[in-house]
Image: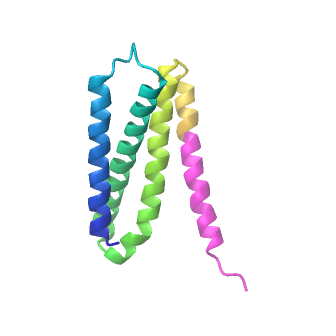
Amino acid sequence: MTLRQYLFLMSLGTILCFVAWLFVIFNIDPNQADNLSFIFFYTSLFLFLLGVISIINLLIKTKILKSEEVVFRHVKRTFRQGVIVAALVVFLLLLQQYRYLTWWNLIIFILLVILIEVVVFANRKFSNRDYV
C-alpha cells in the first residue's frame, strides 16, 4: 500500500466516522438514550479522532522530513499516538459524563499518556540494539 492510498483510505474512514458521529449527535436525545446510543457516540468519536490525529500527525511529519522513504517508518508511530490521544479524550469525556473528572485526574491521565509513549519509545530503542 502506498502512502497516497493509506491517506485516502484513512481520510475516507475518518469522514465516514465523522458523519456517523454527527448522525448520533443530531438524532439521539441524551436524556432518553440507552447504553447502546452512548456506545455508538463514543465509538464513532474515537474512530474520528483517531483518523484526524493520525492524518495530521503524519502530514506534519511528512512536511518536516520531506522524504517518503522515512515517512513509512512513521505511519505505525503516528497511528499509535492517534490511538493513545483519542482514547485519552474519550476516556476523559466518559469521566466527565459520570462527574468523576477533576483537574488532578486530568493531570494524572495526561502524565500517564506521556509515560506510556516514553516507555514505548525507550523500549523500541532498547530492543533495536545489537548485542555481540
Q: Does the stretch in magenta take in 122? A: yes
Say which quadrant the N terminus sits in.
bottom left
Q: Does the stretch in magenta take in 125? A: yes
Q: Can you give x and y, in whole percent of width and height, for residue 3 in the image?
A: 31, 69
On screen, residue 49 above or below 90: below
Q: What scheme was used to colour the molecule?
A: rainbow
Answer with left or right where residue 51 lies relative to residue 91. Answer: left
Q: Residue at x 46, y 35 (%)?
A: 90
Farthest right residue in view: 132
Magenta stretch, main secondary structure class: helix
Q: Can you give x and y, in whole percent of width and height, for residue 114 in the image?
A: 54, 47
Q: Can you give x and y, in whole percent of width and height, for residue 10 in the image?
A: 32, 56
Q: Nearer the viewer, residue 125 or 95?
A: 95
Say which quadrant the C terminus sits in.
bottom right
Q: Which of 125 and 33 is in front in this view?
A: 33
Q: Which residue is drawn at 55% across and 53% down?
A: 117
Q: Give the range drawn in magenta.
A: 111-132
Answer with left or right where residue 11 lies relative to residue 49. Answer: left
Farthest top residue in view: 31
User: In terms of image quadrants, where is residue 127?
Assistant: bottom right
On screen, residue 122 above or below 23: below
Answer with left or right where residue 109 lies relative to residue 130. Answer: left
Total labels drawn: 0
Q: Which residue is drawn at 71% across and 82% down?
A: 131
Q: Which residue is drawn at 47% across and 49% down?
A: 83
On screen, residue 39 above or below 51: above
User: In terms of image quadrants, where is residue 8?
Assistant: bottom left
Q: Nearer the viewer, residue 26 or 94?
A: 26
Q: Can you give x and y, in whole percent of width and height, for residue 88 in the image?
A: 49, 39
Q: Which of 11 and 116 is in front in this view?
A: 11
